[in-house]
Amino acid sequence: MPAMTAQRTISVLWPAFLGACVLEALVFAVVDPHSLQWQGQSLELSRQSVYSLAFFGFWGVTALVASLALLVAKPTDRPASAD
């Protein structure tokens, strides 16, 4: 993996990881995983499974958002002019 690609990957995944940690703490401070239901049925998963699945879901969404922010904030090749 070239150095620039690795740097971009880390600059997306690290903030996304931190954001997922915060979201996990906030959501599960008020939600009990055993009280969750899917289509009227209670989830047949352990608490740890729900925490893990939620964390990876949060991480995926925050990584997507960070990737889009990095894409939109692409630097230009020309230097900024002093106005």
Image (spheres, grey):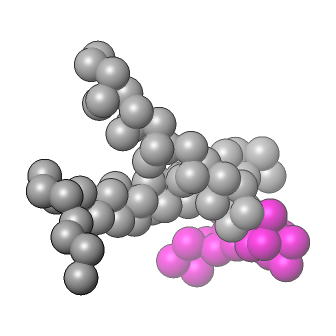
Query: Which residue is drawn at the image coordinates 64% and 74% (left, top)?
Result: 37
Q: Spot the residue most to the top.
A: 1
| Residue 37 relative to residue 76: left or right | right
Q: Spot the residue most to the front.
A: 83
| Count of labels in the image | 0
Q: Quadrant of residue 78?
A: bottom left
Instruction: Report the front residue among 73 and 16.
Output: 73
Instruction: Report the front residue among 79 and 47.
Output: 79
| Residue 82 relative to residue 18: left or right | left
Q: Is residue 50 visible?
A: no
Residue 67 in the image: above or below residue 39? above
In magenta, the rendered stretch is: 25-44
Q: Quadrant of the N terminus?
A: top left
Q: Is residue 42 magenta?
A: yes
Query: Which residue is drawn at the image coordinates 74% and 72% (left, top)?
Result: 27
| Residue 14 relative to residue 26: left or right | left
Q: Quadrant of residue 22?
A: bottom right
Q: Is residue 19 magenta?
A: no
Residue 14 in the image: above or below residue 34? above
